Image (cartoon, grey):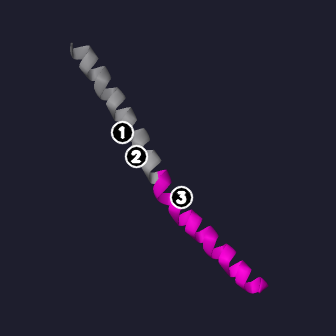
Amino acid sequence: MEKRVLTLEVRIDQTAKSIDRPDRSIEDLRTAMDKKFIHVEKVIDRKF
């Protein structure tokens, strides 16, 4: 029984890690896009 519980705990940890990776990637993408939009806004403000 203890071995089964340990196996389940390992699988849950692996699943949590695999779910966390795309979440971090999406957050990094959002941050990069925000920086780009801020840059574009500054360029537009300078031109007008």
How many C-alpha atoms fall within 10 Å of the one at disc 2: few (<14), some, or many (≥20)?
few
Task: Give how far apart the Cα atoms at labels 3 and 2 are.
Answer: 14 Å
Circle 1 SS class: helix
Q: Locate residue 32: give its quadrant.
A: top left
Which is more N-terminal, label 1 or label 3? 3
Q: Amino acid at mark 2?
A: Leu
The residue at 63%/68% (across/down) is 13
Kindly identify which residue carries mark 1. 33
The residue at 27%/16% (across/down) is 45
- State whether residue 28 is above or below residue 6: above
Circle 3 SS class: helix
Q: Is residue 21 left or right of residue 11?
A: left
Residue range highlighted in magenta: 1-24
Q: Is 23 one of the magenta-colored residues? A: yes
Q: Amino acid at mark 3?
A: Asp
Which is more N-terminal, label 2 or label 3? 3
Q: Is residue 47 left or right of residue 22?
A: left
Q: As rendered, which of 24 and 2 lies closer to the eye?
A: 2
Q: Position of residue 5 (x, y in %)?
A: 73, 79
Task: Give how far apart the Cα atoms at labels 3 and 1 are.
Answer: 20 Å
Q: Position of residue 15 (x, y in %)?
A: 56, 69
Rendered image: mark on residue 44: none
Q: Quick one: which residue is furthest to the right in this view?
A: 2
Residues under numbered marks 2 and 1 in contact, where contact means CB atoms less than 8 Å apart: yes
Tell me the quarter of the image containing the N terminus: bottom right
Q: Position of residue 30 (x, y in %)?
A: 41, 42
Rendered image: mark on residue 29: 2
Task: Give how far apart the Cα atoms at labels 2 and 1 are.
Answer: 6 Å
Rendered image: mark on residue 20: 3
Tell me the quarter of the image containing the C terminus: top left
Viewer-side label of 3, 1: 3
Q: Quick one: which residue is furthest to the front in this view?
A: 1
